[in-house]
Image (spheres, grey):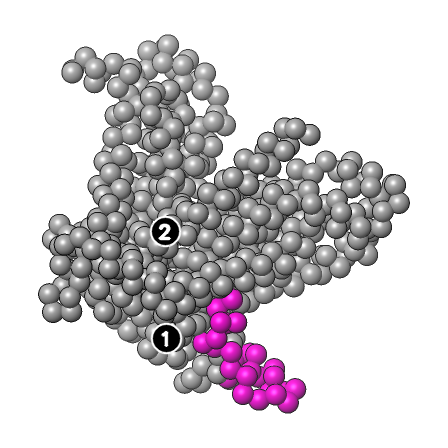
Amino acid sequence: MITAAMRRCLGAYAALVCLLAVLPVLIIVIESFTASDYVVFPPSGFSVKWYVESLQREEFLDSALLSLWVAVIASVVATALGTLVALALVRFRFPGRRVLQSLFMAPLSVPGIIFGLALLQFLASWGVARDMTAVIVGHVIIALPFAIRFVTVALIGMVANVELAAQSLGASPWVVFRRVTLPLIRPGVVASLVFAFILSFDDVAVSLFLATPGTMTLPVRIYVYIDQNYDPLITAVSAIVVMVAFLALGAIERTLGIGRLFGLR
Amino acid sequence: MRRFLTSRHATPWLLLLPASVLFAVFFVAPFITLGINSFYDYGRMTGIIHVFTWKNYEKLWLDEYYLSVIGATFRLSSITALVTLVIGYPVALYLTVASPRAKSWVIALILSPLLVSVIVRTFGWAIILGKNGLIERVFTAIGIPGTDFLHTEAAVVVGLVNVLTPFVVLSVATSLQSIDPAVPLAAASLGASPLRVLSRVILPLSLPGILAGMLIVFGLASATFVTPAVLGGAKFKVLSTLMYQQAVILQNWPFAAAIAVTLTLIVLIGQGLQNMAAERSRYGASLR
């Protein structure tokens, strides 16, 4: 019922939408190689001077390193906790299971900026100073629903009988997990690690309220900078963020495919 | 106690313990604090005054200026939901007829920007729409100079649509996939033109996906901060940017908390509607 001509039209249209989807990112990367001292598109000339400049700016370097640290720690903690929760929710039946399940999924429904404000006001009301730990805790909580989901999918997909077999042959629960379960759910665990890393590394909303001048993650630093300035320096910094994201994307594509990550295909 | 801890009944609770403690302390308690703070008073000299008052909510819900901000939030989210639907629907339709290879390309290209920080994508639009940007260059070339779209509502809509279209595409595509291919074929074989099949058969059957997609976008759009802050400029105010201004610049935490609670309610109502729509379509499907 959909003719070949219609299909070609739809295809051309979809290609256009795809182009628009990646356009802002493309523009940033192209603009970052400009030789001019102000933002103008198309860029005039070619140079890497803004990359050189951005690597010499200590505040961006510090923020980049902080963001990497926060993302690494948050993704490892979220994946570890998420694996424990997924094991409990998939392998056991107990009262209150449903309630806990929706509690752990709740961060998906709450906008990040509101959670950030809540965490800020909570820490302040107890007189706790904001630092890197506060940002990490915030990121662990927003990444946990994804970690639980990825590991849950992997756990449901594996044959539970092999665990019973190992157990009946005398393996302790820890050995069963370490030698049987973990190797079988590895794709889910890897997906969780990568996704939580990207989520944390990209986050502005939650970090915005928790960041202090001394502990400012890179996306927040970019936001604060473009709030006051408008020059090509920040396009180079942004392009570096894009490259980190796409390195992670490549890792996902190689391990399980990006479409499946979002529940399609 | 010791026997309980080593028994099989204790295992799930031990597994859940670390995450539960983390959530209770750093997720549930902060929202309780936020709720309580929203009922406190505030003085510019004294800071937070710990007495119960409705003042913040009265100010937000009754004052003309703040009402207009709430209105602007609804307006922006509704326009964004509509535009994403119009743009995303044909893409979802294409996914149902595309070859597997084309399909995976479209999905990868549409979804990959989701992995780039929203601040970077928004800044990209600032370069496209702003002074000396791509749009202005093109318009100047065809003889219409001075078209700087940055810091307008339209710019914010463009940025939001770019960020949120994937959600509509995914939602509608899932809905389209569940349509029995025999139904549109039957309509076509009975003489309906392709356009008629689309408008009378496919469109109505994908309504659950349309509704879910629009509500997701509405909820996400109403609470995004970066896009309205960067592309809308200082004068364009929605609830999220107002909240940031009150909390960070004016330090009025109780009022910011009241804004946060209001915004949460808006998002939760949207999600409630979305769940209801999902329930109803499931109910309808089970009747068929």
Q: Amino acid at mark 1?
A: Ala
Q: Chain of mark 1?
A: B
**Is residue B15 depicted above or below A109 in this figure?**
above
Alpha carbons under labels 1 and 2: distance apart: 23 Å
Specify the segment rendered in magenta: B132-157
Image quarter of residue A257: top right
Q: Which residue is mark 1?
A: B234
The percent position of residue A191, horizontal first and vertical second, equals 44, 42
**Is residue A107 depicted above or below A151 in this figure?**
below
The percent position of residue A9, horizontal first and vertical second, equals 75, 59
Helix, strand or loop at disc 1? loop
Q: Amino acid at mark 2?
A: Thr
**Within 10 angstroms of label 2, few (less than 14), some, or many (20 or more) residues?**
many
Q: Which residue is painted at 24% across and 38% down in the image?
A: B24
Q: Earlier in the sequence, mark 1 or mark 2?
A: 1
Q: Which residue is painted at 80% across and 50% down in the image?
A: B196
Q: Is residue B151 toward the left or the right of residue B83 in the image?
A: left
What is the quadrant of the C terminus of chain B in the image?
top right
What is the quadrant of the N terminus of chain B in the image?
top left
Q: Which residue is mark 2?
A: B264
